[in-house]
């Protein structure tokens, strides 16, 4: 009987070899690189608009671009769990459902998980292209499932999702009355980190501090 | 033997014609290996994942500490994007009617007794981390340290996960009697 490891090597090689080569991969790469460059060229204005609309006062700026990411690719660890990150429970018409939010490459997706015999349809949005200037934010907040008016419990209305630059290792959030908010890291990849803040009440006004892995404050703001 | 572990031709980090030429060489040499890695990890869009991984390497070349980080960065990105994609697929394919056609054809191959197609089904049933470890070890021929670096876990965890994965494999992938 062949050793299981040898058999595994052979079968993996066979599986990989029967996968037909791509027809014109270089053309696809060129298109993507061009698109990324065009997108990057639009960043400053878009980022400035977002910052102004959110009326965020950024107190502490961050380091120069050349020194900000030294270890990012080397430590691009992803969450190891296979379960979808939990945003909270939604009760609709007496039925208890679970809301989840997760990163899919450079998109952030949210979904309400219906019973297994029904289709779940995630809603995905692009994560921001994080800015390289000193005037734009590394942190963006948003309502969970847009506040989900169909949620009978109102749990989700007491929570906010924070999408941040992947360099943000920890995020602390304070309510307007200075009480600390419970913050959980939901997901992380090379494009972004996602945090969930539970305000235990309406999140009307808050402050936050975003820190790098070495504890250095990257951004501090009051809304 | 695939070329994805060959670290003798990797680009310098930075910009300029030198980088572009070496990036192109790395792309020619490793694109298929990265695409097949995504495929073996169970992604349904391996070409997209391989392309995206190279685009990210290109965009973040300034952040690489040294030239020999390029290939490990690619491997990590392919693994992370594949894992992310699988997780997403588990959501959108919860309804029985959304099973993919290739999954059905794979099942037919399993019934036909093709060993490597049986393996594909077995791998799909393993926990994601176990599948990753098996593919990185037995297809990419990475050592335990490289696997640990790729997955962002400790070497001890790699050893334990490999052991559990092989034990599960022995149970779920028995050898068939000939004739």
Image (tube, coloured by chain):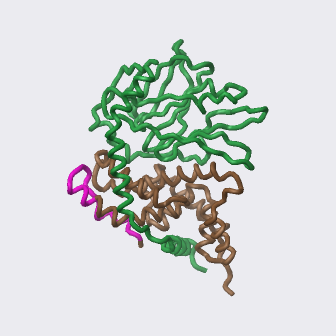
Chain colours: A green, B brown
In depth, the one of B157 and A7 nearer the eye is A7
Left or right: B119 in relation to A104: right
> What residue is at 62 percent from the left and 59 percent from the top?
B126
Examine the structure image and report whether residue B15 is included in the region drawn in magenta.
yes
> What residue is at 45 percent from the left and 33 percent from the top?
A164
Quarter assignment of residue A51? top left
Examine the structure image and report whether residue B83 is included in the region drawn in magenta.
no
Measured from the top left, where is residue A211 in percent x and y?
41, 29
Left or right: A71 in relation to B150: left
In depth, the one of B95 and A9 nearer the eye is B95
Measured from the top left, where is residue A66 in percent x and y?
27, 38
Left or right: B49 in relation to B116: left
In depth, the one of B129 and A148 nearer the eye is A148
Q: Which residues are magenta?
A: B2-22
Quarter assignment of residue A160? top right
Q: Main secondary structure of the magenta part?
A: loop
In depth, the one of B90 and A187 nearer the eye is B90
Residue A11 can be seen in this image: yes
Quarter assignment of residue B150? bottom left
- Measured along the vertical axis of the image, is residue B154 above or below residue A154? below
- Measured along the vertical axis of the image, is residue A64 above or below residue A199? below
Residue A218 can be seen in this image: no
Q: Quadrant of the N terminus of chain A?
A: bottom right
Measured from the top left, where is residue B25 in percent x and y?
29, 64
């Amino acid at each position: 009987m062949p050793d299981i490891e040898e058999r595994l090597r052979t079968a993996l090689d066979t599986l990989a070899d029967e996968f037909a080569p791509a027809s014109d991969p270089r053309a696809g790469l060129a298109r993507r690189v061009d698109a990324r460059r065009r997108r990057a060229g639009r960043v400053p204005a878009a980022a400035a608009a977002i910052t102004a609309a959110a009326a965020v006062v950024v107190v502490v700026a961050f380091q120069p671009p050349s020194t900000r990411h030294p270890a990012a690719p080397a430590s691009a660890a992803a969450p190891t769990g296979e379960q979808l990150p939990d945003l909270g429970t939604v009760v609709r018409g007496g039925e208890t459902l679970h809301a989840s939010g997760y990163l899919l490459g450079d998109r952030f997706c949210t979904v309400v998980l219906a019973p297994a015999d029904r289709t779940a349809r995630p809603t995905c949005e692009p994560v921001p292209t994080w800015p390289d200037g000193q005037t734009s934010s590394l942190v963006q907040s948003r309502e969970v499932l847009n506040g989900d008016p169909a949620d009978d419990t109102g749990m989700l209305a007491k929570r906010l999702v924070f999408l941040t630059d992947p360099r943000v290792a920890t995020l602390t959030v304070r309510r307007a009355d200075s009480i600390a908010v419970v913050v959980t890291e939901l997901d992380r990849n090379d494009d972004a980190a996602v945090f969930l803040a539970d305000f235990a009440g309406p999140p009307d006004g808050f402050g936050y501090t975003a820190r790098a892995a070495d504890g250095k404050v990257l951004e501090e703001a009051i809304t | 033997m695939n070329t994805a572990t060959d670290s003798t031709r990797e680009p310098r980090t930075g910009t300029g014609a030198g980088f572009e030429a070496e990036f192109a060489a790395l792309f020619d040499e490793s694109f298929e290996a990265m695409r097949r890695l995504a495929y073996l990890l169970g992604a349904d869009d391996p070409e997209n994942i391989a392309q995206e991984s190279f685009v990210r390497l290109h965009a973040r070349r300034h952040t690489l500490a040294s030239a020999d980080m390029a290939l490990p960065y690619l491997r990590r990105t392919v693994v992370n994007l594949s894992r992310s994609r699988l997780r997403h697929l588990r959501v959108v394919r919860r309804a029985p009617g959304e099973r993919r056609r290739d999954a059905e054809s794979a099942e037919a191959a399993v019934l036909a007794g093709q060993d490597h197609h049986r393996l594909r089904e077995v791998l799909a049933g393993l926990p994601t981390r176990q599948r990753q470890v098996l593919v990185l070890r037995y297809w990419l021929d990475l050592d335990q340290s490289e696997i640990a670096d790729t997955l962002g876990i400790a070497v001890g965890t790699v050893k334990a996960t490999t052991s559990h994965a092989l034990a599960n494999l022995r149970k779920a992938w028995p050898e068939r009697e000939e004739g």
